[in-house]
Amino acid sequence: MLVWMATLLVVATLLSALAWFARRSRRLSKRVADLQREIGVRECIERQLQAIQSNLQMATEASGVGTWYWDLQTDEVTSSDQAARLFGLETDSRTFKSSDWLSLTHPDDVDRVKSVVAGASSAGEIYHVEYRVARPDGKTVWLSTSGRALRDSDGTVRRMAGITTDVTDRKRLEENFYQAQKMEAVGRLAGGVAHDFNNMLGVISAYAELLREDAGLPKSSAKRVTEILNAVQRANALTRQLLAFSRKQVINPTSLDLNAVILGVKDMLQRLLGEDVRISTNLAEKLPNITADRGLLEQVLLNFAANSRDAMPKSGHFELKTSVRATPAQGTRDSSEEFVVLDVSDTGCGMSPEVMKHVFEPFFTTKDPSRGTGLGLATVYGVVEQLQGKVTVDSTVGVGTTFHIHLPSVESKVAGEPTPPTAPETAPAATILLVEDESSLRNVLTEFIEASGMRVLAASGGREALARIDAGERIDVLLTDLVMPGLDGRSLAQIARAKMPSLHVIYMSGHTDDTLIQKESLEAGLFYLQKPFSRADLVKAIAAAMVPVA
């Protein structure tokens, strides 16, 4: 009986154990299944994270953005491949010290970078700084870095993270834009100075001329007056160069063959360069015409030659090359505009990058003051800009310099050019309405006209001149300054001619404002006097203006 009961107890115990093991097995199986599912989810998440990280890395590399992490405790910077490339480092050099980074930073920017980073580190704020980096490959680039100090739970800043991008192209565009603005501002100043100076020169030369014509003037004084007039002529040449730079001179454009202009002055250029400098031409066949003032274009070539002569004092090679290039027209996608290109090269001493930044500025020169005024290349710049073109320069110290001039091509002559005075210097019996806002110049021009036997009505501005016309006085010629406050000379002439259709008009100016220079020339049939001018020039212009049109 006892054996039977013991057997039953053992069996019951075994059955209970089996049941417990079965329950544990089911629980274990469920746990294993749960773990398998969890592992699967985690693997899926990891794959997604890896894909996101890969996409993010490709996106940052495509955008040129490099990422970095800076451990302030160990002073180790860990960067992405793109960040390493931005600093010119090998992609396996992704971990470096901050001192390595600063050693690549341009010396002029190091203190500023340190100050910005230190301030952001202590304040725990976002910072942004742009600086130059001299990479190991010898190339200097502009980098822009944005970063942020990361605080631990106790508020201590132990780490920093951020991004770095290459902004070299933007910096170059900004520099070009600022340079263009500066040149425009200097040009406006130069034009204004030349205008006012020409008015003063006009007064000086006019009174000097009247003195020279005085019968009672001693011979010794007459010689001195002649020297004054010669000095005025030299000063006038300088103001013309300023006007060329500021693009505020009246031009006489025609349709020209640039090759013919070059060949026409080649001998003159050779004499200017000297026998030790070899001159050569490489002229493109079937070169399209350009619209330009021949005299100004020849002046550009002479200025280049003079500049190259000083760069090659012993010997060298001066070359003029022409070609045609197509550049997409502004505002269009399919059409293009042809440019005639003139490349002027020499094998002279060349220029440093710093000198090239200022080479077109007026009065900037590396020569001794006795050897030049610094207006030669400034004149080139102004003339080319006035001809709707562009001029750039490439130069290497010890190798040479090449100027590139791009001028828009044309196929026909521009209609309308200022008509030069061609009538004989005989003062006609005429009444002249003189309009000049500068009182001293107005007074001396009044004497000029009266000394020539003509009647003059003087007005200080456009409104006063119109009042004279409305008064019904007989007027044959309107002699008016172009640039005046209030009503300018052109507007005055239009209103006056509407009132008096037979009125003849002569413009005069020290320069013409950009708004008055349209289509590269003034209207056909116009008579124009460039200040300062002589009494003979004035009489000739009046006589020519009054010649009946056939």
Image: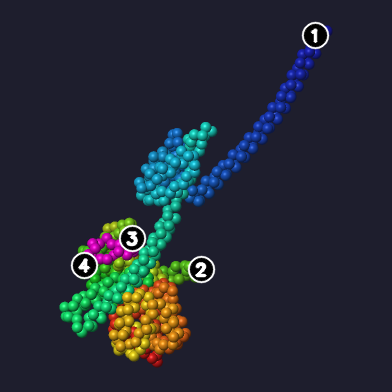
* Residue 3's disc number: 1
Disc nearest the viewer among 2 and 4? 2
* Residue 357 vertical position relative to residue 322 in the rendered view, above or below: above
Disc nearest the viewer among 4 and 3? 3
Disc nearest the viewer among 1 and 4? 4
| Horizontal side, residue 274 vs residue 119: left or right | left
Circle 3 — which element? helix
- Place of residue 47 in the rendered image (x, y in percent of width and height, measured from the top left): 59, 41
The type of residue carrying mark 2 is Thr
**From mark 3 to mark 1, how far is it between C-alphas?**
119 Å
* Residue 316's disc number: none
Q: Earlier in the sequence, mark 1 or mark 2?
A: 1
Q: Is 290 or 462 nearer to us in this picture?
A: 462
Q: Is 35 or 262 nearer to us in this picture?
A: 262
**From mark 2 to mark 3, how far is it between C-alphas?**
33 Å
Residue 378 seen: yes
